């Protein structure tokens, strides 16, 4: 807090308390000033300012020690003159008080002082006086710095965390020299199957894996790049790109090479797979947080594609829409914002309505009509599929109960309810259907569970167990989209499957495409040999209906018969066709 522009201590500081010579007789006012200064616990001095020069009238022992230290360091660094400039600016401003903090380099590192200055009554000559104090804040600032370091860094890997990553980026952008053609990029890295390591080997092994990965990633960086751990198993790299995408892909290659060799954990060799997404800034003025979000959106796509993904325009908007859908869907499920539509299932030989397929529909006040393919995918990704699936099963059973009440007796129809493979993996499907049937007072044979081949392929043993549990409820089982998956045909006869549903991609064009017609005939022949019934989806005209009827197909659905309709219209449609109607 010293400066060589301040005149040496005058005679008023010759008292032994300050260690400065004083050959003059102190006035009563000087005695009062020195008593005041001596009583202050911090460095303090009374200053005067005249003819553009700042002078020390008196100072206490702590201030005198600071002056002696100053004399050992003539011509201190520029930062130490800051307090002189602030005092002069304060005096000229006419304000009553002023507060500011100074920083100087000491023998043990930076030293910080909180300085205050205020006006005193003028001396006997009329000279204005000012009281200056300086409180040592070095310890507090050191503690704050250490706490801030902890807040901005990851305790496990010692890398910057998400907040610290943002500050590191800001610092690089502001304080580094950037060529006019340069841009920056963010490379996001998501460790695949990390949760399996925690589950199989324990959290300590998971921590060891993260530390090892962090070291390997750090070894792949260039000078000036910044590596951070921005999530549980998510890392990110900030890189200056002088050659745009080519530099980014070079870094990606180095990352893949660094993680290519297996890591030894608990005596096991573990290969680290990762999803990588990149985003490049449009200019150095672009908000880094936006670029980070774009990279994270790209890495989500990479997790599905298994390839390195570069952010493309519109991906972030898609991610934001998925987030909006998730938020609104959560509200819709809790507030009854969804509905079921019912598409008739027609017996192709008699024209009789045998049942309906229940299809979820959502018309949101803000998002409008959201297609099922969109909100079901979001539900699966967010974990809402369990709530959505349970709602659909309960609502479909209740709809049949309301139809029975209208008709006065049980309707001779069933309702098909779709099951997601993710829902099957996460929920107790057997108890869900048991509750739905019991709450509605509906017999099990009036409800059919539709599932895709992927739901069985994912875990055949588990699938076999709950499929037989549903059969114990007297429910029927339909395999949806048959022919598009990867099921083992040899296992069909070992599973309690009742119905095969031929995917619409085969049915809708079978009249024009000979190959599709062959596939349909093959499925019908397979089903007959296994004693299974067949439902054909996507019947859009009478010619298709007649052709499938001639081939011996049991049941069909499609726009030729009816589009999905609400609960009341479905009941009226059934009642209108109840008296025998042909195709």
Image: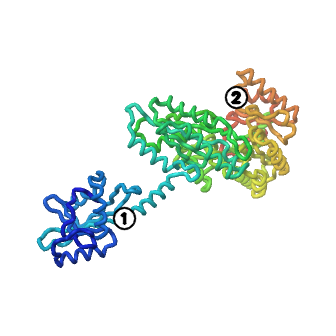
**What residue is at 70 percent from the left and 25 percent from the top?**
509
Q: CA distance from mark 2 to mark 1?
A: 83 Å
**What residue is at 39 percent from the left and 36 percent from the top?**
178
Q: Which mark is residue 136?
A: 1
- Nearest the camera: 386 or 340? 386
**What residue is at 44 percent from the left and 31 percent from the top?**
242
- Residue 48 seen in the figure: yes
**What residue is at 22 percent from the left and 59 percent from the top?**
6
- Nearest the camera: 383 or 223? 223
Callout 2: SS: loop
Instruction: Name the spot of residue 235 as percent of width and height, x first.
Output: 56, 44
Instruction: Name the spot of residue 201 as percent of width and height, x first.
Output: 72, 49
Callout 1: SS: strand
- Nearest the camera: 76 or 274? 76
Give the quadrant of residue 416: top right
Q: Please tell me how many numbered marks the rendered image carries.
A: 2
């Amino acid at each position: 807090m010293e400066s060589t522009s301040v005149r040496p201590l005058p005679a008023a500081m010759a008292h032994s308390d300050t260690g400065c010579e004083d050959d003059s007789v102190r006035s009563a006012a000087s005695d009062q000033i020195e008593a005041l200064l001596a009583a202050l616990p911090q460095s303090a001095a009374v200053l005067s300012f005249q003819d553009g020069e700042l002078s020390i009238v008196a100072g206490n022992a702590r201030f005198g020690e600071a002056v002696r230290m100053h004399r050992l360091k003539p011509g201190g660094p520029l930062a130490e003159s800051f307090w002189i400039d602030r005092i002069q600016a304060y005096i000229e401003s006419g304000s009553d008080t002023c507060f500011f903090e100074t920083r100087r380099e000491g023998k043990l590192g930076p030293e910080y002082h909180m300085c205050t200055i205020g006006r005193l009554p003028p001396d006997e000559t009329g000279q204005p006086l000012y009281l200056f104090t300086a409180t040592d804040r070095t310890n507090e600032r050191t503690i704050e710095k250490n706490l801030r370091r902890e807040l901005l860094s990851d305790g496990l890997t010692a890398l910057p965390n998400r907040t610290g990553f943002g500050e590191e980026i800001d610092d690089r952008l502001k304080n580094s020299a950037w060529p006019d053609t340069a841009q920056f990029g963010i490379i996001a890295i998501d460790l695949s199957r990390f949760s399996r390591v925690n589950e199989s080997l324990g959290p300590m092994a998971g921590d060891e894996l993260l530390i090892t990965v962090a070291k390997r990633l750090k070894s792949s960086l260039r000078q000036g790049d910044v590596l951070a751990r921005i999530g549980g198993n998510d890392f990110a790299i900030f890189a200056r790109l002088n050659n745009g995408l080519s530099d980014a892909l070079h870094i990606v290659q180095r990352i893949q090479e660094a993680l290519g060799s297996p890591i030894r954990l608990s005596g096991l060799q573990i290969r680290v797979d990762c999803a990588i997404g990149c985003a490049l800034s449009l200019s150095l003025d672009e908000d880094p947080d936006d670029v980070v979000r774009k990279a994270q959106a790209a890495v989500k796509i990479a997790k599905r594609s298994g390839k390195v993904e570069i952010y493309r325009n519109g991906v972030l908007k898609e991610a934001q829409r998925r987030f909006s859908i998730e938020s609104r869907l959560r509200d819709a499920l809790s507030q009854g914002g969804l509905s079921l539509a019912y598409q008739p299932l027609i017996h192709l030989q008699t024209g009789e309505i045998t049942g309906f397929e229940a299809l979820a529909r959502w018309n949101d006040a803000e998002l409008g009509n959201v297609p099922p393919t969109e909100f079901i995918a979001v539900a699966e990704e967010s974990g809402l599929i369990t709530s959505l699936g349970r709602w659909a099963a309960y609502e479909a059973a209740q709809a049949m109960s309301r139809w029975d009440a209208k008709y006065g007796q049980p309707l001779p129809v069933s309702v098909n309810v779709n099951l997601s493979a993710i829902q099957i993996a996460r929920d107790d499907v057997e108890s869900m259907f048991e509750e739905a049937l019991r709450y509605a007072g509906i017999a099990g044979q009036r409800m059919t569970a539709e599932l895709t081949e992927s739901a069985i392929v994912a875990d055949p043993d588990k699938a076999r167990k709950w499929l037989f549990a549903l059969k114990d409820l007297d429910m029927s089982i339909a395999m949806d989209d048959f022919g598009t998956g990867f099921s083992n045909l040899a296992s069909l006869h070992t599973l309690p499957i009742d119905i095969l549903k031929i995917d619409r991609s085969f049915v809708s064009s079978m009249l024009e495409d000979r190959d599709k017609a062959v596939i349909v005939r093959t499925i019908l022949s397979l089903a007959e040999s296994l004693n299974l019934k067949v439902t054909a989806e996507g019947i859009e005209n009478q010619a298709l209906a007649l052709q499938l009827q001639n081939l011996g197909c049991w049941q069909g659905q499609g726009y030729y018969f009816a589009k999905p309709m609400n609960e009341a219209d479905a009941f009226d449609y059934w009642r209108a066709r109840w008296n025998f109607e042909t195709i």
